[in-house]
Amino acid sequence: MNIAHAQDQAVKVGVNLNAFDAIMSASLVVKLTLFILVSLSVLSWAIVWAKKKQFEAIHSSDERFLRFFWNAKSWDEVFAQLNEHISSPCANVFKAGFKELRKVAESLATEKDDKPKRPQLAGSDNLARAMRKASDLEIAQVENRLNILATTGSTAPFIGLFGTVWGIMGAFQKIGATGAAHLAVVAPGISEALIATAIGLFVAIPAVIAYNHYVGQLKKVEIELNNFSSDFLNIAKRNFFKGE
């Protein structure tokens, strides 16, 4: 009699069950899993939006700075107006290179009584290292928090799978409690299990797409910095460094 009553109740639950009911009737472990997935989704979308704004600002700032750089009459003029291009990675790399170039020029000038109008410096390794370090710092700042998207994309399906396994375990426990393997008995557990899988994929897929997209954007920024550094070094060697 108890088994029949349990089966009747299970049939009613199975008939009336929808996605919201499945979530509300899920076990504490599955609810915690879903909460983690939703939190990762909110965090991922926040990072996606922030990175979108960041890359738009970078591309716009670099375009303005490079146009100003190539049209400027001297590097002193460019350096004097760097505050107008604080969002440009290329401007920050130029700042590091120009400061290093000026340090080398000043150190050489103190060793000579007669200061040449255009300092002829020996060795450009320090300048190259300074610009490489500045480029690496800019890339690290742009790359910041992209690892969260990668982690979310790789772990969310497995977190959802954990909820799926736990839900199926609950379904088998109900089978043992009722003594019947009727579909209506296991439907609630299977339903919450599939919801956990679906939410895990819903969280992971956008994160992976966004991560791959922004990695491509990051490579463009890196190429832009490398090209600008090469141009800067070529101009410096041609005008300031002897025998190089």
Image (tube, helix red, strand yellow):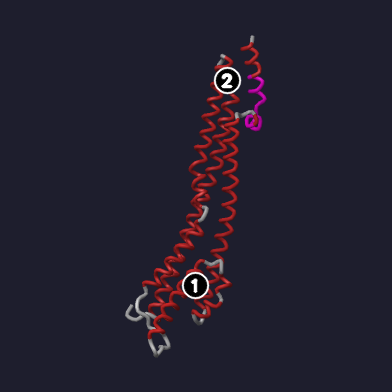
The quadrant holding residue 102 is bottom left
Residue drawn where x is 52% and y is 76% of the image: 79
Residue drawn where x is 58% and y is 55% of the image: 50
Query: What amino acid is at disc 1?
Result: Lys
Quick one: label 1 or label 2, which is nearer the N terminus? Answer: 1
Assign the C terminus to one quadrant of the image. bottom left
The x, y position of residue 153, in whole percent, is 50, 44
Q: Residue beneath label 1, please?
A: 95
* 105 sits left or right of 43 in the view: left
The quadrant holding residue 238 is bottom left
The x, y position of residue 229, in whole percent, is 43, 70
CB within 8 Å, label 1 to label 2: no
Q: Is residue 10 above or below residue 90?
A: above
Name of the residue lying farthest toward the left: 243
Q: Read off the magenta span.
A: 10-23
Residue drawn where x is 56% and y is 56% of the image: 51
- Indicate yes or no whether the magenta region holds residue 183: no
Q: Nearer the viewer, mark 1 or mark 2?
A: 1
Q: Residue beneath label 2, please?
A: 174
Assign the N terminus to one quadrant of the image. top right
Q: Is residue 117 above or below residue 30?
A: below
Name of the residue lying farthest toward the top: 1
The x, y position of residue 14, in whole percent, is 63, 23
* 42 sits left or right of 223 in the view: right
